[in-house]
Image: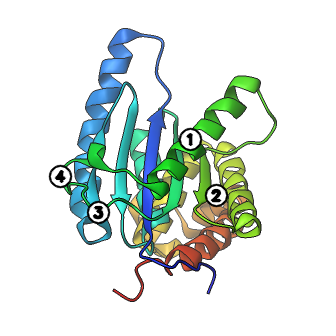
Amino acid sequence: MFFFFFSKPYISIIGEVLPSKEMEERKKQQKKLYFILEKINQEHDEDISAKFMPTIENEFQGLVCKGCNLMRLLLEIKNELHPYKVRFGIGIGEIESDFQSENAITISGPGYEKARESLKILQNRDAKKQKTFTDIHLEIVGEQNERVHLMNTIFSLLTTLESSWSNRQREIIYNMLKYQNTQCTAAKCFGVTQSTIQKTLTAGKYYAYEEALSTLEKIFSEIGDNE
C-alpha cells in the first residue's frame, strides 16, 4: 500500500486557469471552462463527490472520492482548455462531512486545505520564476513526505514532456491515451500512416510519458478501491 489513512480520504482539487490579459479573451476562457467542467461532471460522475465548478476569479474546484481515473480527468481538462494554461493543486485527506455534492464551494477540512496549499506553492514558484517546472502539485495530510516528493517529481516529468509537444503531437498523444488506441487505429483517426503515428509518438517521448502516467494511476487507484 502506498497510502495509509485512519479515516476515509478524499482528493480535493483546486484548479486555476492562467488569465488572459485581454478582457474578451477572459470571457472566452470562462465560457469554455463552464462547458468543460459540466462535461467532466457527467463523464466522471461515479468518481466525483462534489461536482467541479468555477469559484473565485479564474479558479475552479471539485472533490473526488475514487482515484482510479484521476489522471485521465486532469488530462482531459488540460487538453480541452488548450491553448489556455491551467494548473492544479491537489490535496489528499479527510473532508468535513457537511459538504454539498452540487456545490463544491462547501468543501472544507484538512484535505481541502492541502489542495489550497498545493496551488499556493505553484503560484509562488511562478512568481519567483523558479526552475522547478510543473503544473500539478500534491500535498497529503500526515507524515508522507517521501511519497509526496516522489509523486511531485513524476508530475514535473509529465509537465516537462508535455511542454515539448507540438499541437499535432498533443492531439495524437491525447487521442492514444483517452481511447487506448493502437497506432493503426490512431492512424485511421487522423488520416495518416501508421509510421507517421509511430514517428510522432517517438518524437513526443510518448512511451516514457505513458509509463509515468500509469505509475500515478496505480498509486491513486488505492483511494476508493474498496468502495
Residue type at mark 2 is Thr
Given residues 114 and 163, the one toward you in this image is: 114
Q: Nearer the viewer, mark 4 or mark 3?
A: 3
Of labels 4 and 1, earlier in sequence is 4
- Tell me the residue at 77%/67% (across/down): 146
Number of residues whose C-alpha sits closer than 10 Å to that of mark 1, classed few (under 14), some (14–19) or many (20 or more): many
**Residue marked by disc 3:** 97
Image depth: mark 3 or mark 2 in front: 3
Question: Residue 28: x, y in percent?
Answer: 31, 24
Q: Is residue 59 left or right of residue 149?
A: left
Q: Amino acid at mark 1?
A: Leu
Foreground label between 2 and 1: 1
Marks 4 and 3 sit apart, C-alpha to C-alpha, by 14 Å
On residue 200, the disc is: 2
SS class, disc 3? loop
Please indicate whether residue 110 sits to the left or right of residue 35 in the image. right
Q: Quadrant of residue 216?
A: bottom right
Asked which quadrant contains residue 131, the reply is: top right
Q: Quadrant of the N terminus?
A: bottom right
The residue that label 4 is drawn on is 102
Q: CA distance from mark 4 to mark 1?
A: 23 Å
**Vertical arrangement, residue 77 with respect to residue 184, above or below:** above
Q: What is the quadrant of the C terminus in the image?
A: bottom left
Which of label 3 and label 1 is nearer to you?
Answer: 3
Structural crowding at the residue carrying mark 2, measured as other residues with C-alpha within 10 Å and reported as few (<14), some (14–19) or many (≥20): some
Decide which of tag 3 and tag 1 comes sooner along the chain: 3
Q: Position of residue 77 (x, y in %)?
A: 41, 49
Which residue carries the number 1 mark? 119
Residue 187 visible to an observer of this rendering:
no
